[in-house]
């Protein structure tokens, strides 16, 4: 155990970026609040660099309640880069807003809570991190102050608050039964497990705590929708992985939740004509796939690399798809007709990201799903691997529904301007190819 604050340098840099940005925004002229985006971006870049500098270091526990290990380092890096990408998306949307500073600082605070969820080694730290990741996100969902955003924020808050209370009740029951809140050696009773899962599945977007996902994705602004369906999942799944290896001793329960989540997400996506709701249900199905390595944690050595690589692959691919939606400003499938003709690069990015979400080679999610299936098989859950593969085939149909009009000859619209989606698409392919090469090296 260590009590050196520098062991938490990435977290401190994110916090410093949020505080410095907020103070700068208080004194900066309204037309120059863009400087806050640069401050927050530099803080995230610094956090990513600080994480890279300590990769491979021996794992340890900071302040007897926070794990500094490869799981935390991976979450730090993925969250920092994904949040930096989100800032690039949000900058155009927030420009000129009288509260532009608050957009960037709220994003950073929610990202900080996500990292803390991933590194928490104590249930009380987990609850505090859950609140820090959630409350700024509620404000972001309703930031535009329009009717859809207000409705989305209200639903998001009510469900988050309700499931957060259940999670806190789970902590209470677990403490009463085990006499401790530290993950080390913790054995939660079944009631405590179920209640703890309530809060974590809310952040992960898994069944039965998934109801907020489509409504918030449709009602909030596009950059916020990209953020809340991507970044908080990272901390939630790492926290679930830690607990499944210690406090949770019900892998069958997690496997059933994984099947329900991936199946419901795919089935609900079939009939969606609104692309934001389609992506929302797609993210729910992806949560089901991500629950597979969580269910086999401790049963195979493939579980941890499968989860971490899949999280990185999902983050870049999902953000890329949302970047196209943000750049086009189009929410209906039929409005994408002829996109390949008027904006070839935007069409390339969209098709690459949608094929990536299916799990088509050589994208990163393909390799993530391959590792996930191998982990399930090696962990003694061959039936779960079969169900996940069947769901992957099912996801082809609704993604192709979106791809088909992109190449239609008809359709009108203005060319799309935006580089973020292209960067994400290329990153997804490069990550998939690089990961494949690494796996082939003996």
Image (cartoon, rainbow, N blue to C red):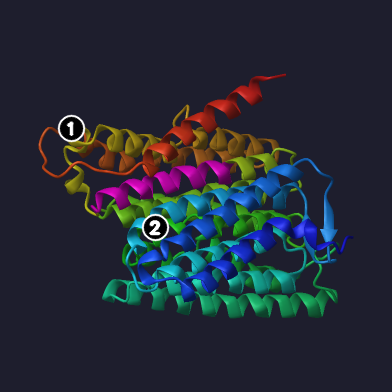
The C terminus: image quadrant? top right
Q: Give the magenta-colored segment's residue range.
A: 310-330
Residue 78, image x, y percentages = 59, 48
Q: Is residue 137 above or below residue 371?
A: below
Compare marks 2 and 1 and give the one earlier in the sequence.
2
Please name which of the two marks, 2 or 1, marks the residue nearer to the observer.
2
Mark 2 to mark 1: distance in Å?
28 Å
Q: Is residue 316 magenta?
A: yes
Residue 155, image x, y percentages = 40, 75
Q: Which mark is residue 341?
A: 1
Q: Is residue 26 magenta?
A: no
Q: Which mark is residue 91?
A: 2
**Who's the residue at 25% across and 53% down the image?**
329
Disc 1, SS: helix
235 and 282: which is toward the camera: 235
Apparent side of residue 201 relative to residue 35 in the rendered image (left or right): right
Q: Is residue 334 above or below residue 358?
A: below
Label 1: few (<14), some (14–19) or many (≥20) C-alpha neighbours in 10 Å: some
197 and 319: which is toward the camera: 319
What secondary structure do most residues of the magenta stretch adopt? Answer: helix
């Amino acid at each position: 155990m260590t009590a050196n604050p520098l062991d938490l340098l990435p977290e401190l840099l994110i916090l410093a970026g949020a505080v410095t940005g907020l103070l700068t925004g208080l004194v900066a002229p309204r037309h120059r609040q863009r400087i806050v985006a640069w401050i927050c971006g530099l803080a995230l870049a610094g956090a990513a660099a600080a994480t890279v500098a300590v990769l491979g270091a021996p794992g340890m526990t900071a302040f007897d309640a926070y794990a500094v290990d490869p799981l935390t380092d991976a979450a730090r890096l993925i969250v920092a880069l994904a949040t930096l990408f989100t800032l690039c998306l949000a900058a155009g949307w927030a420009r000129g807003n009288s509260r532009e500073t608050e957009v960037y600082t709220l994003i950073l605070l929610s990202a900080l809570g996500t990292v803390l969820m991933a590194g928490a080694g104590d249930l009380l730290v987990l609850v505090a991190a859950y609140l820090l990741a959630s409350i700024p996100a509620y404000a972001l969902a309703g930031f535009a102050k329009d009717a859809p955003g207000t409705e989305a924020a209200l639903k998001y808050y009510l469900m988050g608050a309700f499931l957060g209370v259940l999670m806190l009740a789970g902590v209470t029951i677990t403490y009463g039964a085990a006499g401790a809140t530290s993950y080390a050696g913790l054995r939660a009773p079944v009631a405590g497990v179920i209640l703890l899962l309530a809060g974590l599945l809310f952040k992960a977007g898994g069944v039965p705590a998934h109801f907020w996902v489509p409504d918030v994705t449709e009602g909030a602004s596009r950059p916020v929708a990209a953020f809340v369906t991507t970044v908080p999942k990272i901390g939630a799944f790492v926290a679930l992985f830690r607990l499944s290896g210690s406090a949770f001793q019900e892998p069958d329960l997690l496997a059933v939740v994984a099947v329900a989540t991936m199946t419901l997400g795919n089935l609900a996506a079939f009939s969606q004509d609104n692309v934001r709701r389609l992506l929302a249900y797609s993210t729910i199905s992806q949560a089901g796939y991500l629950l597979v390595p969580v269910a086999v944690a401790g049963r195979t050595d493939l579980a941890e690399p499968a989860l971490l690589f899949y999280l990185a692959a999902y983050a870049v691919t999902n953000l890329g798809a949302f970047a196209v939606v943000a750049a086009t400003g189009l929410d209906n499938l039929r409005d994408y007709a002829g996109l390949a003709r008027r904006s070839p690069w935007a069409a390339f990015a969209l098709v690459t990201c949608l094929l990536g979400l299916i799990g088509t080679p050589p994208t990163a999610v393909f390799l993530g799903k391959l590792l996930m299936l191998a982990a399930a098989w090696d962990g003694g859950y061959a039936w779960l691997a079969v169900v996940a593969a069947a769901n992957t085939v099912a996801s082809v149909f609704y993604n192709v529904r979106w791809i088909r009009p992109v190449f239609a000859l008809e359709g009108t619209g203005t060319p799309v301007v935006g580089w973020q989606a292209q960067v994400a698409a290329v990153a997804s392919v490069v990550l998939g190819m690089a990961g494949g090469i690494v796996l082939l090296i003996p």
